[in-house]
Amino acid sequence: MIFPYLDAGTTALRPIDPLDGAAVDRFLSGHGLAEAVSRDVLTELWASSPDEVVAQFEVVPRDGGPPAGLSGLQRLDLNGGHVQAGVFVDPAAGAETGAAAAALTVNYAFSSWSVRKVYVWTVEQAVGELSEVSGIVRREATLREFVYDGGELRDLNIFAVYREAWQSAGPDLLQRLSRPRTPC
Amino acid sequence: MPHPHLETIRTRLRPAGEEDVPRLYDVLARLGLHSLPTPSAFAEQHRQGAEAQFAIHVRPSDDVIGFSSLQHLNRAGHIQVGIFTDPALSKLGAGAEAMMLTVNYAFATWEHVRKVYFSTTEASLRDLGRGMSLVPREAVIPEHLFFQGRLWDVHFYAITRESWEESGARIVDRMVRGLERRDGQRA
């Protein structure tokens, strides 16, 4: 069983109505979170219509306070058995917040739909938010110079996390992220 | 820059309209390469559009044997080509010619297009002929599509402008010259 947790540690996901790429950009800019992801990358990789989005979350501090970003799941294909996750968290919120948002979003996908894999499409070389479980994040394909980003052409890297791998590593990850951190 | 030719001695591309959607649905259903939505849902999706869509006619009958399209034109300078031909009607080489005309149209029409992508599965690779074996494969997404009762890998091929202008555009020019010669003889 995979339970659709909505909080881990100090971070929570708050379900909201679906947003397309332009609305995600407006939300992030409006909350001073534009560092989370570039507008160009959002335009290219996130939904052009909210109809493509099957779950959308504000990433918020568990105990209240302004959002640190957004996450969501789009392009659910129950035939192909996959869905695509997007996590857009301001780096200023800390790596732990991004990691919790990513883990909760991927976990929510496997909990909610009969999918074999959750994709992350990114122009980065790795899914930084899932670095604690990088061993289960598989690079499936790279399309070269596929994304226009601020005057540059960047590769699109398609990563995937498979259900079996998540079932073995996901619960431990969520548990680790939920433990209170001791100050250094 | 290549010229946006739309016909050769044995193939003609005609801009497709809404009236062609039932025929396109029929071709796709016969091919079995998609798990299709209902006809009305398909027509609705189709309305959301492509950059260009063509009905493929073969000469001399002028029958429609299938459709080709260009979609997802992108600021990064790429576009995706698709082609579907009715297996019962396709004459040898007509589909390949239509594919070449469509790719050529993309490079001729949009100056900023650097690459034309073509995605396919093993289910139709064998029907694409020898030509595709010369196009470099850029990526494969494993077990991404489900149809014909199983999952299929999706292969992405990329045709660059440089390689097209070196060889493909010249072949298209030769195919078109065949048409011009025939018309010249008739005149």
Image (cartoon, helix red, strand yellow):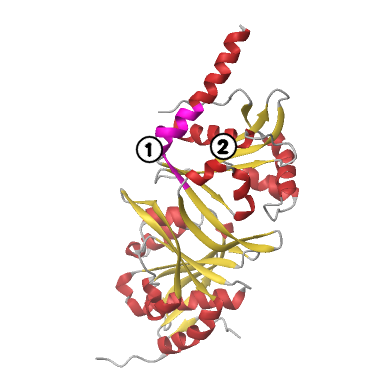
Specify few, some or many for label 1: CA neighbours under 10 Å numbering under 14, 14-19, or 20 or more: few
Which residue has dot 1 on it?
B162
> Does the segment drawn in magenta span residue B168?
yes
The image quadrant where one finds the C terminus of chain A is: bottom left
Residue A90, above or below B116: below
Boundaries of the magenta span = B158-172
Q: Callout 2: helix, strand or loop?
A: helix
Seen from this angle, which residue lies furthest front? B130
Label 2 crowd bin: few (<14), some (14–19), many (20+), radius 10 Å? many
The residue located at (62%, 73%) in the rendering is A113
For residue B53, side relative to residue B136 (left or right):
right
Q: Nearer the viewer, residue A174 or B127?
A: B127
The image position of residue A30, as x and y in percent, is 38, 61
Provide the residue designation for mark 2.
B99
Residue A177 x %, y %: 41, 86
Labels 2 and 1 in the same subunit? yes
Residue B6, numbered label: none
Outermost left residue: A184
Q: Main secondary structure of the magenta part?
A: helix
**Image point (61%, 48%), residue name:** B126
Q: Quadrant of residue A82?
A: bottom right
Q: Residue at x 67, y 64 (%)?
A: B150
How far from the left and from the top, in percent, is residue A125?
35, 65
